[in-house]
Image (cartoon, rainbow, N blue to C red):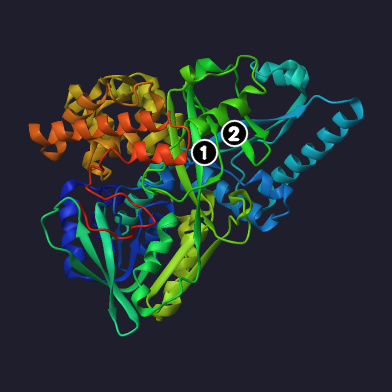
Amino acid sequence: MRDPSVSRNTAGRLSPIRRTSDLRRLRDEEFDVLVIGGGVTGAGAAVDAASRGLKVALVEARDFAAGTSSRSSKLIHGGLRYLEQLELHLVHEALTERGLLATRLAPHLVRPVPIMVPLPAANPAKRVWQRGYYGLGVAAYDVFAGVFGGGRGMPLHRHLSRNGARHLFPSLQADKISGAIRYYDGQVDDARLVVNLARTAAAQGAAVVTSARVTGFVREARQVVGVRVKDLEAPGSPEFEVRAKTVVAATGVWSDDMSAMLRDVGLRPGLRVRASKGVHLVVPRSAITGEAGLILRTATSVLFVLPWGGHWIIGTTDTDWQLDRSHPAASARDIRYLLDQVNEVLDRPLTTDDIEGVYAGLRPLLSGEADSTSKLSREHAVVEPMLGLLLVAGGKYTTYRVMAADVIDRTVRRLGGPARESRTDQLPLLGADGYAAAWRDRQDMARRHGVTTGVVEHLLERYGTLTVHLLAMMAADPELAVPLDGAPEYLAAEVAYAALAEGALHLDDVLTRRTRISIETAHRGAETAEHAARVMGAVLGWDETVRRREVEHYQARVTAERESQTMPDDLAADAARVGAPDVRGLTADRRAVLLEADL
């Protein structure tokens, strides 16, 4: 539990000193709950458990959201296509969570984004049928959000004529559409939400440590009583044990690895997780003229074209992936598929020259009999393959809080004692408290701190009411008030704050997840690396050797990713991508060679 004399914001600061303290706690204390995995589900589980008064630790082998949770379509959505498939319980669940995030839990990170459903050109009778069919679906979506959404947080849908659709999205080919329907969903910077979850867990008293890789379970008889951990920031140090009454593995596409650690006792995993690769392209806002996103039906799934600040996000693919799970690679085939799909409706076709960034992520789908990953379940499951070990897997980003509550409910039952209900639906994340008032008064805040309103708006939409801390840093050190080289949308203060308060340990953590420079600039962050490393190194105490190594690692990663995206297929793309070593010293994470020794 947090010391009541310490503010929530201070208690949630993930500083280098805090990491040292939390490592000591891992070695010295026994926890009620140890969470493995720093993605959205693991961080959400840590928040849920800590807010119930349990003694909690969270360990993550790499960085917060380093896997799936930083590589989504950046949507908090109810799943419009699930409504079409009559999976009403999934829509109800997701819309409830969308409403909570947009209005109470994280209004500084989740905001409405308009999306158009284009209606294809057809004969008059078919046009009437299409508008009625799609209109009924979107109307039902709004009804679900209003009745079950716990606070809508989104405007209502609207029907548009062909001219209205073209006015809102001039880049649409006029002869391909008969009109459109505009609706709203939520947009989020997925990695920043996970960081805020981790900090909120820390503010509730959880020990939170990244670069801490679980290498095995500690067992007594047939019960898991902890894990063995390797501190990847101290490669010469020995592994150590962390004791816990319950271990929760929220490891996404690595879930099968957790079960493999127990194969010596012949346990069946209880669930199987299949990885589906989703690739997204990022292009500049100038490449497409439009004021709303698009959702397009494809032969296998749906395609989103979404506004993202000064950019567009186009995605996604949906293909099976069985290669390196830490660094899934986008191939030239993936990129060509996305370009071909979006170019069917654009008046000016996009080419590879338009692409600023590319990212690929893996969805953890519960494995079933379906051959196509697009048909696998998006529901989640909680299983207990061995006493003391709970696995949670599946689901979707939007419903992370439901998954977290389910696995911690199971944890509380096995721990016994007084019933402790989840209260995370009432717990704003750090930066959310007072956000509406801060946004209303943003011009006054700008005047008081001697910066432009644009700077304050940028910071508020990323840090919420924690913005005052960054403004104070900029006032104390004018060098932190300057834009980053090669990425003028971001300030040097954001790099310093990431290292000082958000648990960033490496340059890649900042350029890829605390900011989105790696996908929002044509140079992929290569021109920013030196400046960011100087700022970050000043906080973390890097000498010239460390600073140079961080820059070289990052540049090598960019080079490997660029090369992989020219390869014709997954095998060739994967081989190119794994050529760049991980800065944390992890080996290639391949299914054929599980749990190899650290390099």
Q: Is residue 576 above or below residue 274?
A: above
Q: Quadrant of residue 314?
A: top right
Q: Quadrant of residue 251?
A: bottom left
- The residue positioned 17% from the left and 66% from the top of the image is 240
Q: Is residue 516 visible?
A: no
Front-lying residue, 84 or 200:
84
Element on which disc 1 rests: loop
Q: Is residue 243 above or below residue 190?
A: below
Element on which disc 2 rests: strand
Give the image location of residue 57, x and y in percent: 29, 63
Give the image location of residue 352, x and y in percent: 49, 21
Q: Which residue is mark 2?
A: 304
Give the image location of residue 420, x and y in percent: 44, 72
Label 2 amino acid? Phe
Seen as rendered, the residue at the extreme bottom is 221
- Residue 109 located left or right of residue 483: right
Label 1 amino acid? Ser
Marks counted in the figure total 2
Q: Is residue 372 above or below residue 477?
A: below
Q: Is residue 43 visible?
A: yes
Q: Which residue is mark 1?
A: 73
- The residue positioned 16% from the left and 28% from the top of the image is 534
Give the image location of residue 472, x and y in percent: 23, 31
Neighbour class for label 2 at 10 Å: few (<14), some, many (≥20)? many
Choose the circle earlier in sequence order: 1 or 2. Answer: 1
Q: Is residue 397 above or below residue 412?
A: above
Q: CA distance from mark 1 to mark 2?
A: 8 Å
Q: Are marks 1 and 2 in contact (CB under 8 Å)?
A: yes
Seen as rendered, the residue at the extreme right is 125
- Residue 46 located left or right of residue 176: left
